[in-house]
Structures are given as C-alpha cells and as structure tokens.
Image: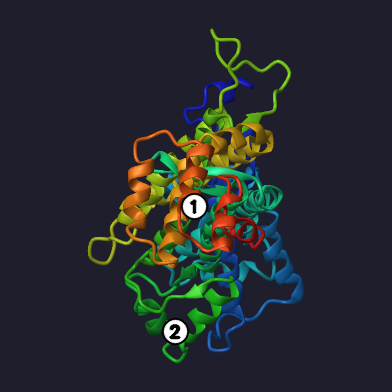
Amino acid sequence: MSESTLLALSPLDGRYAAKTDALRPIFSEYGLIKARVKVEIEWLLALAAEPGIVELKDFSAAGKARLRALADGFSVDNAARVKEIERTTNHDVKAVEYFIKEQLKHDHELGPALEFVHFACTSEDINNLSYGLMLDAARRDVLLPAYEGIAATLRKLAHAQAAQPMLSRTHGQTASPTTLGKEIANVAARLERQRKQIAAVELTGKINGAVGNYNAHVVSYPDVDWPAFAQKFVESLGLVFNPYTTQIEPHDNVAEIGDATRRANTILIDLARDIWGYISLGYFKQRLKEGEVGSSTMPHKVNPIDFENAEGNFGLANALFEHFSAKLPISRWQRDLTDSTVLRALGTAFGHSLIALDSLAKGLGKLEVNPQRLDADLDAAWEVLAEAVQTVMRRHGLPNPYEQLKALTRGQGITAESMRNFIESLELPVEAKQRLRELTPGSYIGLADRLAKGV
C-alpha cells in the first residue's frame, strides 16, 4: 500500500481502493467535473445549431470536433486547473464555465462564442444532467455487470445442485425437504427481477433555467420553442426529459435507482446470511488458500469472511441509499443546497455495493458442496414425512390425519422404522401405501429439481 492509501480517511480509497477502481473515473471529483464539461460543451453545440439564435452561427465540422475533443479528452490536469479557478470563484460550476472559456478564447472560430458558454443556465441545469450521465455510466458499466456476474454464478450452482436434497428449516425447525439447487434458484430469480428494475429506472434531466420556467431563455429569444429545444437536448444525452421542475430536477430518479439497488442488495444480504449458516451446518466447505489464517488464535478455523464482508458492505451501501431516497426528493421552496453535498456521496454507496459484490463473488467461488453432511441431516429427520403421510390420508378419507401425525411426531424422535410401521397400520390403497413405503426424506422433494433448472 502507498502512503496515501494508508492515510485515506475512507476505506473505499484505502483498504478497498483496488476494488473500487472502476467507479473512480465516474464518481470522483474529476469524474463530476468531466461530466459538467461534457454537458456545457454539448449545450453550446446545440445552441449553435439552432437557427433562431441568430447571433451564434453553427460551427464547422472542425470546430465541433475541437469542442468535443475538449470534453472527450478532459484530463486530471484539466480538472486540477478547474479547481484552481474555483479557489477564486468559490463556485464549482462557474469554474467549469471559466475553464471552457479559457480554452476557447484564442480559437479564431470558437472564441467569438464565449458568452454562449453556460447561456441561460443555472448551475443545477448542468449538475442534474452531469449526475444523470454519471449514474447511467455506473449502472451500465459497473453495477449491472456485477449483479449479472453474481446471477450467472447462482444459476450455475442452482443447475449443478438441482437434485441435491436438503433439509429445510422453517422457523429454524426441520421442515419438508427441498434441494440445494432450488434454494439457490430462489435467490437467482429474485436478483434477476431486481436487476431488471435497476436497468428500467428512467434517469431524468432538465435544462430550464433558474426556477424551471425558461425565464432568461424567453426574454432573450422569445421565438424559440424552448421546451421542445430542452427536450431534444436532454434526450440527446441519453436521458429522459423532465418538463416540470423548480430550480432543481427533483431527484426522484436518484431515489428510484437507489431503492432498486437497495432491494437487490437486501436480497444478497439474505443470501450471504443463509450461506453463512449452511457453512456453519457443514453443508458447504470452503476451499483453502495457501497462507491464509482463519483465526489469530484458533488454527483450525476457516471463517466465512467473504460473506460477512459482503453483508457488512451491503448494509453500509443500503444505509446511504435509504438516506438518498428520504432526502433528495425534498427541497425547500424552489431550491436549497442540501442536495449538493448528499449527491457527492453517490459514489460511496455504489462503492460499498461493489465491494460487497466482489466479496460475495469471491465467497461463492470458494464453496464446495458437502453431500454427505446434507444427506446425514435428512436421514436423521424422518419426521418431515408427516406432511406427506397425512396429506395422502386426507385424500383417501382416513379420519383425523393431521391429529394422528401430530401425536406421532410432535416433540418425539421419529425413525425410519417407526414411520414405516405407522404407514403399515394405515388402511390405504395398495398403490398409495407402496408410494409412502418408498418415500424417504431425501426423495421427498416435490418439483424442486425441475424448478431449480428453470432459472
């Protein structure tokens, strides 16, 4: 670790820095400034292409290329220059405007257009679109691929273990058997549903001025259809146009993507805890890695640390997502600045989610199924066939089936022999009795095998 990593205040930039590298170009201060530059440049290009803005002529192909090169090639050194300007302006978006003007002022074609940089814009016009672009990049390039990776691993495990019987535990007590694959398939199906919901969230944007009414736009160019112009511009960025706002885009979309991500994370907390429990029961072993230590004092231990790390980081991420959802859609009157500092923590929430997903993937990759332990638990739980027997008894009209099985099994040790003796005592059709005779806890799995293969 470098000295800067060791001195990092946040573990995202310290202990876990390597795991969050993919998010750094998106949610860092550099990433935010780069997004702002892109929005400002695209706005200038859009204005120049509008015939009604007669004082600004459309740029040549070469001029457009130079403008887009400024945005596309925006570097960390460029961002440092913006921050230097900000030390004077004490305003981050104004510093971006001044930086762009500084870059264009000596260009013979672009220089005359300087005062159309940031034309009729309030800072939030630039910021909301910048965060929309950042969220879209994080969702598309980082978050969804990570969830898809976990889902693919779960599907593979579900299919491989589709027929491996496993004792269920409802309320922590022995219950009707399932299969290991079916239990994993349940999670895979839930995760896929939430993944689709994350992907479906509309990331909205606006560029309608100081209070959302195009006041400055209309007084400058009354003949331009500004709502149509703004919609076309927002959609050109790949975002969904929001026609009704105050000074700020209300951030409902940020709450929505946070809530959808939080639900996906909660499903994976559920998985991490269950796998932790199955490791404790011996249903899974963990592959060993040379040199690793499980406990500082107990040499025998192989702790489920990846699942514990995942649970902890999902929890941290979800706490932030919950705050975003509760806070960001609320703004006093037409604008207050509380959203500004909160939005800067988006990368922190995504970062903890990414660390958790990485740990979960690592943990799942270490698992080895222990069928002997699974089968042994089933063989010691013949009481779980009580459901099967009493249901067949119901079909054939035998008296008080539930009560008879309750008397036989509740709070008592049931063996294969005692269960089969009870079955022999029943006045059932030959075929039904034979089917019950052949039943074991390991074969009483319903359609679990087929269901597990369906994800």
x 56%, y 23%: residue: 303
What residue sits 47% from the left and 61% below the top? 392
Q: Residue furthest top?
A: 297
Q: Report the residue that reaches farthest toward the bottom.
A: 223
Q: State whether residue 346 appears in this view.
A: no
Q: Nearer the viewer, residue 88 or 9?
A: 9
Seen from this angle, which residue lies furthest right? Answer: 62
Q: Secondary structure at mark 2?
A: helix
Specify the color scheme: rainbow
Give coordinates of residue 201: x percent, y percent.
49, 67
Q: 430 and 316: which one is in front?
A: 430
The residue drawn where x is 50% and y is 74% is 240
Assess disc 2: are there few (<14), some (14-19) or many (≥20) residues with their C-alpha within 10 Å of its C-alpha. some
Where does the image place residue 295, in percent across and percent down from the top left? 55, 14
**Which residue carries the number 2 mark?**
227
Q: Nearer the viewer, mark 1 or mark 2?
A: 2
Image quadrant occupied by the N terminus: top right
Mark 1 falls on what kind of element? helix
Whether residue 439 is visible, yes or no, is: yes
Q: Which numbered circle lies on residue 95? A: 1
